[in-house]
Amino acid sequence: MASKKDRIGALVTNNIAHIIQFQLKDPKVGFVTVTDSSFNADNSVAKIYVSFLGLPDSQKRIEKKKKAKGYIRTELAKRMDIYKVPELVFILDDSYERAQHLEAVLEKEADEIAKKTKK
């Protein structure tokens, strides 16, 4: 059975994802995915990991999310029935780009090994 902290974390994450996708009206931000979240011990601070797909300059777009965090937090408070809505900290999740880079490096190494074994 999930603990209360886990349930609150999942609700916060799902609600923030919905708010970002359907309520923020900034076409320059592009497609945003909330990939993960973590909370401190008393749920007063939430680190929200976001990923931007399809467009470069992710750091500029994460800055736009930081500017909108007051609006996001207000909308979150309207949706949730908890005593204190956590402070939101948006962090860029670049794991997809790192995985692509790692895959490219491994593929290159595999090609080099294949060339050496053919000789």
Image (cartoon, rainbow, N blue to C red):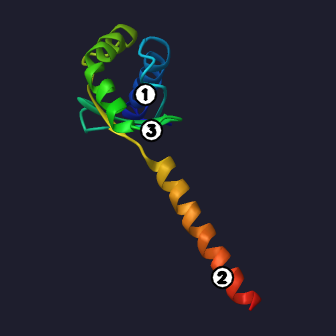
- Residue 103, placed above or below residue 77: below
Residue that extends furthest to the top in the rendered view of this protein: 78
C-alpha span from label 1 to label 2: 44 Å
Type of amino acid under label 2: Ile
**Disc on the earlier residue, 2 or 3:** 3
In the image, taking residue 102 as reference, residue 84 lies left or right, namely left
Q: Residue furthest right?
A: 118
Question: Which residue is tagged 1?
Answer: 13
Disc 3: which residue: 56
Q: Nearer the viewer, mark 2 or mark 3?
A: 3
Give the camera-side residue of 55 and 64: 55
103 versus 28 height, above or below:
below
Sequence-first tag of 1 and 3: 1
The amino acid at mark 1 is: Thr
Residue located at (39% from left, 37% from top): 58
Residue at (29%, 11%) from the top-left corner?
74
Q: Residues within 10 Å of mark 1 (few under 14, many from 20)?
A: many
Question: Which label's residue is closer to the chain start, 1 or 2?
Answer: 1
Viewer-side label of 1, 3: 3
Task: Give the Cα distance between marks 1 and 3.
Answer: 24 Å
Q: Residue at x 67, y 75 (%)?
A: 111
Which residue shows up at 27% across the image and 31% down it?
A: 43
State the SS at label 2. Answer: helix
Give residue 113's mark. 2
Instruction: Check contact, mark 1 vs mark 2: CB within 8 A.
Output: no
For mark 3, give the secondary structure.
loop
Q: Can residue 107 be seen in this snapshot?
A: yes
The crowding category of the residue bearing disc 2, from other C-alpha atoms within 10 Å (few below 14, some 14 to 19, many at least 20), is few
What x and y, as percent, mark residue 39? 31, 36
